[in-house]
Amino acid sequence: MANTRSASKRKRQTDQRTVLNRSVLTGLKGQQKRLTAAIAAGDKAKAQAELDGLASRLDKAAKRGIVHQNLANRRKSRAAKIVAAIGARKADAGIVEVGAG
């Protein structure tokens, strides 16, 4: 329990930010799952579309400070490599988990 009015206000602000940040992170996880499913199916066009969506969400989250910029860049890079390899190595592409780590 906060002892001062300013501490109470900070708690309210933190609670509001936590709810918004959690929804953004949940959206990122869903986007990564959709990308992983497209990769597992071997559908390069759908995987590319999902990769574009994931990159956009990661960039927005990094810009707002919800995730670190390096994390966003790392996940985009790894996902792009996997999507690029769909045509070349369909057998290996399905077993790689995007965003793990």
Image (cartoon, rainbow, N blue to C red):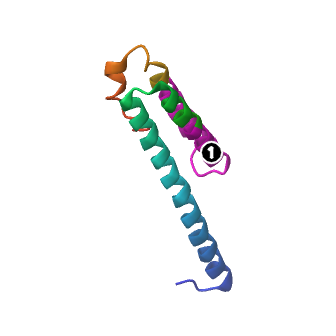
Amino acid type, callout 1: Ala
- Residue 64 lies, with reference to residue 97, above or below; the image says below
Q: Give the image location of residue 8, x and y in percent.
A: 62, 81
- Residue 14 lies, with reference to residue 5, above or below; the image says above
Q: Secondary structure at mark 1?
A: helix
Q: Is residue 98 visible?
A: no
Residue at point 51%, 52% (across, down): 27
- Residue 66 lies, with reference to residue 37, above or below; the image says below
> Is residue 5 or residue 27 the one in the foreground?
27
Residue at point 57%, 83% (across, down): 2
Q: Give the image location of residue 50, x and y in percent.
A: 52, 36
Prevalent SS, magenta region: helix
Question: Within 10 angstroms of label 1, few (less than 14), some, or many (20 or more) residues?
Answer: some
Q: Give the image location of residue 71, x and y in percent.
A: 53, 39
Image label count: 1
Q: Which residues are magenta?
A: 53-80
Question: Label 1 belongs to which residue?
Answer: 62
Q: Give the image location of residue 66, x and y in percent.
A: 59, 52
- Residue 15 lies, with reference to residue 65, above or below; the image says below
Residue at point 53%, 28% (across, down): 77
